[in-house]
Amino acid sequence: MSRFRLLFAALSTVLALSAKAGGLPALDILTEDDPPLTFSQNGKPAGLVVEVVQEIQRRVGSHDPITVMPWARGYRLAQTQENTALFNTNRIAERERLFKWVGPVTTTLGSFFVRRDSKLKLVSLDDARKLGQILVVRDWYLQLMLSAQGFSNLNAIVTPNQMVSMLMHGRADVIASENTTMPTQLKQLGYQPADVRKAYTFIHTSGYIAFSPKTSDAVVRAWQQALDDMKRDGSFAAIYRRWLPGEPVPGLTGEK
């Protein structure tokens, strides 16, 4: 009788797991500290894209937790683990075959930033290649894209806030960052957005939720459908404008 009960309990567990999230498998959902898009607040994930992902989860029936970790670690895990999601992941040619994609969830300008009082002028990528060093966040799309463009003067930093702090303390003259995150990161460190200026904008990209290659296609389809529904019913735009007022809201895939 005890053996029967053990078998029954095991079968019940399997059935419960298979019923989880409408039959979809459990996910490891990963993000980084990159406010205002993604960050940890009082030990809980928060931010624009976090709210979008949480609403997608609600619609598909997923209750998997979101874990905030350093980007480089999450980036490695999302390429090697099964059923893993990583966001906000900018979709560039160098990453296209590394993941399965759901989005877009952000639209971003990648630029070189300098302190406001800097005399440095950049009019091309060639000018930037001649600099002594440019700080970038390790394994960010900006590092990958610039490396692919022949930049050998990149210094990879662990977190965005560390990179911005180094710029403002004079430990670097130029950093590669984004229009969507720089203002918040400056304020967190006690500075104002006007304390830096764009020296040169070199890429326009869209951010996505990136799923590991071994993630079920059914998961990817369900998440994309939920996101598309959010865009159609206006809930996506409401979240986006609350966090990034004045910034263009990404449309459905394929829309400008």
Image: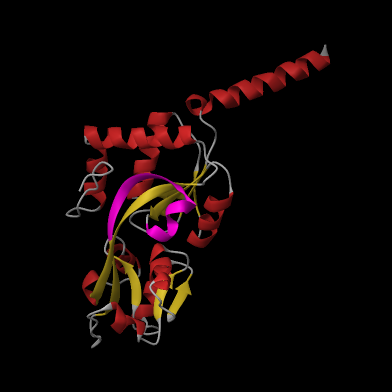
Image coords of residue 23 (percent x, y): 51, 25
Q: Nearer the viewer, residue 127 or 19?
A: 127
State left or right for residue 65 relative to residue 125: right
Numbered disc total: 0
Most extreme residue toward the left is 246
Instruction: Please provide percent x and percent y for residue 56.
Output: 38, 36
At horizontal 37% and vertical 82% (from top left) the residue drawn is 169
Question: What span is in magenta?
Answer: 92-108
Give the position of the N terminus as an image quadrant: top right
Instruction: Measuring from the top left, give residue 213's x and y in whole percent.
Output: 52, 46
Lateral position of residue 237 relative to residue 56, left or right:
left
Examine the rendered structure and indicate whether residue 59 appears above or below residue 175.
above
Q: Is residue 211 visible?
A: yes
* Relative depth, front residue between 86 and 37: 86
Residue 159 lies within the magenta run: no
Q: Residue at x 30, y 58 (%)?
A: 205
Task: Say which residue appears at 32% left-offset and 71% top-offset.
Answer: 190
From the top left corner, tell me how far across and down residue 202 is, in percent: 27, 70
Q: Nearer the viewer, residue 131 or 45?
A: 131
Q: Quadrant of residue 83?
A: top right
Residue 94 shown in magenta: yes
Location of residue 13 by image quarter: top right
Furthest residue toward top: 1
Q: Compared to 15, does 128 lie above or below? A: below
Residue at the spot x=39%, y=41% of the render? 53
Vertical order, 235 against 208 (above or below):
above
Is residue 183 positioned above or below 170 on the image? above
Whether residue 42 is visible here, answered yes or no, is no
